[in-house]
Image (cartoon, grey):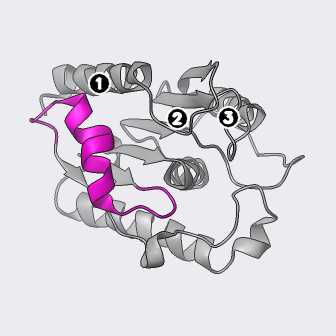
């Protein structure tokens, strides 16, 4: 099961063409929550955390509740994959980081951990135990600095995840074909190992 988290100004239907159809694995099930007013929190993800409250905490709780609901239906957290794009990638990264429990994989397309420049993240322990994490985006992305994507990759590595982080020479705010191929590879490996 893949939880898809859309970006600012989008709705779940946008991810059908952007991600689901391009990955092309019909045996994978997806669920995609809708943010109120098409935004998960009001300001940029590198603003002080308190300036994005209470929206940020509500959004994190919404993803946690969905994950728990799936768990109650027999899809354990360790079997769930979290995908996000842009604001959704930031929310996905922050959710997995804060929850500190291994999921099947995290794919954060053009996003990173939430907080202002100079933020420091707790990296004690290794709760993610080789969890696959796909991160990255454009080197000159207008909304998500490459430096934050690299910082996010380092945090997840220090917490025990197996991180694939690529910064592409581009200024396009998008999910490129290489990222789709890498995400497909992660899902295919999960399908093969777990019999989805």
Q: Which of 162 and 178 is in front in this view?
A: 178
- Frontmost residue, 186 versus 74: 186
Above or below, 147 against 120 in this view is above
Which portion, as a residue range, is magenta?
A: 6-28
Where residue 51 sits: x, y (%)? 77, 74
Residue 179 on the magenta span: no
What residue is drawn where x is 68% and y is 77%?
A: 53
Residue where numbered disc 3 is placed: 149
Q: In which quarter of the image is the C terminus?
A: top left
User: Which residue is labeled 1 in the image?
Assistant: 184
Task: Kindly state the secondary structure of the residue where label 1 is placed.
Answer: helix
Q: Is residue 57 above or below residue 144?
A: below
Q: Position of residue 10 (x, y in %)?
A: 41, 61
User: Would residue 23 be counted in the magenta stretch?
Assistant: yes
Q: Distance between the residues labelled 2 and 3?
A: 18 Å
Tell me if label 2 and label 3 are in contact, CB under 8 Å.
no
Disc nearer the start of the sequence (1/2): 2
Mark sitting earlier along the chain (3/1): 3
Numbered label attached to residue 128: 2
Q: In which quarter of the image is residue 166?
A: top right
Q: In which quarter of the image is the N terminus?
A: top left
SS at circle 2: loop
Residue 151 in the image: state x and y as whole percent: 74, 33
Q: Nearer the viewer, mark 1 or mark 2?
A: 1
Which residue occupies the extreme right position in the image? 118
Between the residue at mark 1 and the residue at mark 2, the CA separation in whole angstroms equals 21 Å
In the rendered structure, are the residues bearing label 3 and label 1 in contact, judged by CB atoms less than 8 Å apart? Answer: no
Q: In this view, does 88 lie above or below 62?
A: above
């Amino acid at each position: 099961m893949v939880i898809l988290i859309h970006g600012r100004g989008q709705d779940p239907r946008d991810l059908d063409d952007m991600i689901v159809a391009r990955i092309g694995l019909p045996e994978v099930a997806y669920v995609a929550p809708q943010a109120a007013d098409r935004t998960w929190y009001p300001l940029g993800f590198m603003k002080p955390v308190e300036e994005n409250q209470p929206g940020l905490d509500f959004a994190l709780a919404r993803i946690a509740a969905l994950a728990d609901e799936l768990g109650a239906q027999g899809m354990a957290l360790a079997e769930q994959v979290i995908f996000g794009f842009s604001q959704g990638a930031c929310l996905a990264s922050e959710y997995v980081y804060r929850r500190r429990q291994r999921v099947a994989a995290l794919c954060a397309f053009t996003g990173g951990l939430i907080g202002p420049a100079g933020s420091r993240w707790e990296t004690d322990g290794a709760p993610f135990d080789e969890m696959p994490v796909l991160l990255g985006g454009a080197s000159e992305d207008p909304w998500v600095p490459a430096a934050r994507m690299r910082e996010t990759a380092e945090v997840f590595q220090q917490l025990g995840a197996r991180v694939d982080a690529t910064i592409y020479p581009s200024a396009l705010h998008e999910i490129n074909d290489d990222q789709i191929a890498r995400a497909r590879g992660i899902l295919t490996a999960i399908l093969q190992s777990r019999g989805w």
